[in-house]
Amino acid sequence: MPRNAESTAFRSALEVIRGVEPRVADAIGAELADQRESLKLIASENYASPATLLAMGNWLSDKYAEGTVGRRFYAGCQNVDTVEALAAEHARELFGAAHAYVQPHSGIDANLVAFWAILADRVESPALKKAQARHVNDLTEADWFALRRELGDQRMLGMSLDAGGHLTHGFRPNISGKMFDQRSYGTDPDTGLVDYDRVAEAAREFRPLVLVAGYSAYPRKINFRIMREIADSVGATFMVDMAHFAGLVAGKVFTGDFDPVPHAHIVTSTTHKSLRGPRGGLVLCGPELADQVDRGCPMVLGGPLPHVMAAKAVALAEARRPDFADYARQIVDNAQALAEGLLRCGAKLVTGGTDNHLVLIDVTGYGLTGRQAEQALLDSGIVTNRNAVPQDPNGAWYTSGIRIGTPALTTRGLGTAEMDTTAELIHAVLSQTSAGVGPDGTASKAKYVLDPALADKISRQASELLTGFPLYPAVELG
Ligand code: DSN
């Protein structure tokens, strides 16, 4: 697309929106300005391409399309069929999967689709058979009770939250924690790494129906061949949630034992993190689970979002281009440079470094909680998020960690030299922030003291670092 076409497209869209609700147009414009000015280091965020963003704002949004390609519960879905089939084809080709389901609206949804498919495939349940055969509205209350009884004691083994696992892998705040009896595996207390012998031991003791691998805050690779062997040894279905690192799989940075697709029975992902697509999810599997996976809507999903599937098709096509592999490699080079820079400054990192897109700083080394560190960095123009560290003494709300990731800054074009500077800026903020006191004079886990002049200085330096790397350079909103 010519550069001025991008600018015209976004300007015109905002002009039209402004004619109806100017405050929405202003918020959209302000979001671009904010994103342009800050050092975005949230490991799960990225910047989708103009083509991906534009593919979402159109008439496909208006179409209902329950069902699957060529088999819809609504008439007139031929164009939705086109975009869904394209997105699925790109996903299959990109990841080398036999089947791709691109309807999930998010990672949580993708995981629910996968969990339901596994339960339906594995559990002998008369109530479930009834649920599959009938429209859900035809099930009686007694049917639902039977369903819960028959499915309710199935077991899931996944990574613990403080080791970097995800809420949707059987933890109580998510429905998966109600669906499954969950046990988790942690990481080695000395190295912070997954200890496969301990995972195997936990699997032997617990005999899970589902073994889950995947994380949102573990800064290392996972050997999926070994995990599959563990799953096979106890008859478990092996599921990988690659939401965070899908871009590294797509870009062939994670290959062989570290590519989940050849090893897992089923793989789920989001499309908007390192994969750099629209917000959404997808599921990959072999032919044996495909039929159950395709029942995702209406079993656990609302109607598909055709405009988002169109954007998935665009982003997945982009990820199939050779330059996406360069991008994926650079994400990891940048994360490693950032980790090395932080280590040189004396920061304490969980596992001592990274081999993926993220770094987890243990900020207790600075005498701070994650919450204090997150806010102090935000004051200084550096956007991160707090995160628990293994055996976190401050719990899941205040936490003791800061998670930083490089997919977004790498999209902007920053390289390893800029990561050195970024590490120095982060260290400058954290080393000069101190814990505050609460109203009763005791140490606070939330309050902090940071000289505003220093925060301003770092903000300016962060902004200067970004000047050579404009975000959406072709887009001028005027
Ligand atoms: N919220 C995402 C993350 O930040 O990792 C995962 O759900």
Image (cartoon, rainbow, N blue to C red):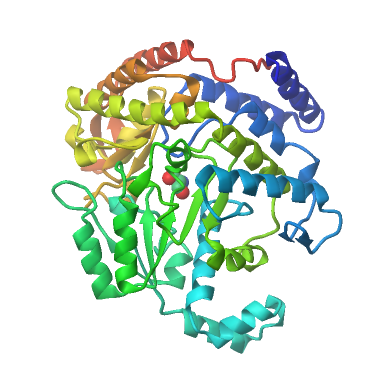
Residue at 39% from the left image edge and 54% from the top image edge: 166
Percent from the top left, x then y, of residue 161?
33, 55
Residue at 67% from the left image edge and 44% from the top image edge: 308
Residue at 30% from the left image edge and 33% from the top image edge: 373
Q: Is residue 48 left or right of residue 363?
A: right
Q: In the rendered view, would you say 181 is above or below 230?
A: below
Circle count: 0
Percent from the top left, x then y, of residue 473?
59, 15
Q: Is residue 159 left or right of residue 241?
A: left
Q: Is residue 19 left or right of residue 132?
A: right
Q: In the rendered view, would you say 150 is above or below 254?
A: below
Residue 416 seen? yes
Percent from the top left, x then y, of residue 99?
58, 56
Rendered image quadrant of residue 474:
top right
Q: Quadrant of the C terminus?
A: top right
| Name of the residue lying farthest toward the right | 76
Residue 378 seen? no
Rendered image quadrant of residue 203:
bottom left
| Front one among 369 and 250 | 250
Percent from the top left, x then y, of residue 289?
54, 66
Rendered image quadrant of residue 339:
top left
Q: In the rendered view, would you say 168 is above or below 461?
A: below
Residue at 50% from the left image edge and 33% from the top image edge: 46
| Front one among 20 and 60 | 60
Q: Quadrant of the N terminus?
A: top right
Q: In the rendered view, would you say 294 is above or below 420?
A: below
